[in-house]
Image: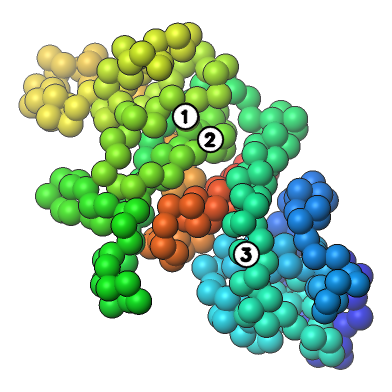
Amino acid sequence: MDHQLTFADSEFSHKRRQTRKEKFLGRMEKLIPWQRLVTIIEPYYPKAGKGRRPYPLMTMLRIHCLQQWYSLSDPAMEDALYEIASMRLFAGLSLDRPIPDHTTIMNFRHLLERHNLARTIFDEVVKWLADAGVLLKEGSLMDATIIEAPNSTKNKTGTRDPEMHQTKKGNLWHFGMKAHIGVDARTGVTHSFTTTSANVHDLNQAEHLLHGEEAFVFADSGYRGAEKRDELKDVKADWYIAAIPSKVKALKKHPRINKVLLGIEYKKASIRAKVEHPFRIIKCQFGFTKARYRGLKKNDGKLAMLFALANIVRVDQMLRA
């Protein structure tokens, strides 16, 4: 992006040592198909001449990506643009020009939410990866993760989020939502996902996690019986569902006798492990461990952007490997 640097920014950009943040942003700068994403948002973005002149769309999109990568609220993002030179340069901003305030950053997020553009961006990234030959569509892996939501009632309504629900996992109760994903078996790239309240069974979302060209599907024991369901009986794929934990535990009591069966379960688990990569990226790397917004629609948009960016990070990991 073309912009005039201040003396401070110019000195920063020519310093010898690059931080990890600078290196990461440099790789994302080259890897993300910016123009394809801008084309999606452009028809809905305010045009110059109608009210206050808007910031360049590319700048606002980059700021939005920074928010997802570093789990920043709107005010924290505004502060970061003033304080962190690498983020400012990535967004194409300079201290001698106006910096978007937190309201402008919030309005851009609301624009994406209002027109469901985050979902369109996710679909476009998946299509871009398929066109590039990264998404191979040989097989799919399915899984779901619980994302906690605030259960406090200290808010305007005095209630918990009505679209979030509680569910029991092991001996613990969790209140929040679930992200269900379908992942490419070869690369670990997410090709589909759904967002539901936490009490929805994984099996009920299985039909939405397949692209239809799979030769095989791997999933954990929560998806037992998937191939027999009416909505999935026409899927022409081999199903490899993990045994329930109690059965695996029983097999381990006599490892020599059950060597073959245990080997099969270990093989299933090793292949299925790639489905955890997107969850690791959005939770551990991007810091999305708790729902920030009320309602499933807003959080679905948040997840769409996170999984789109996680796919690009996954490609970056493969390129560097």
Name the residue at 63% across, 25% down: 136
Residue 23 appears in the figure = no
Q: Which residue position is annotated with label 2?
A: 192
| Residue nearest the viewer, comparing 83 with 117 | 117
Residue 109 numbered mark, or none: 3
Q: Is residue 264 left or right of residue 186?
A: left
Q: Are marks 1 and 2 in contact (CB under 8 Å)?
A: yes
Tell me the quarter of the picture where residue 66 sits: bottom right
Residue 252 % position (x, y): 13, 27
305 shown above or below 254:
below
Q: Is residue 18 left or right of residue 227?
A: right
Q: What amino acid type should be assigned to the residue bearing mark 1?
A: His
Residue 260 appears in the figure = yes
Q: Secondary structure at mark 3?
A: helix
Residue 145 % position (x, y): 36, 46
Dot 1 or dot 2: first in sequence order is 2
Cα separation, mark 2 vs mark 3, equals 22 Å
Dot 2 or dot 3: first in sequence order is 3
Q: What amino acid type should be assigned to the residue bearing mark 3?
A: Arg
Q: What amino acid type should be assigned to the residue bearing mark 2?
A: Ser
Residue 208 numbered mark, or none: 1
Q: Secondary structure at mark 2?
A: strand
On the rendered image, what quadrant is the C terminus found in?
Answer: top right
Q: Are marks 3 and 1 in contact (CB under 8 Å)?
A: no
Crowding at mark 1 (Cα within 10 Å: few <14, some 14-19, many 20+) = some
Tell me the quarter of the picture where residue 67 sits: bottom right
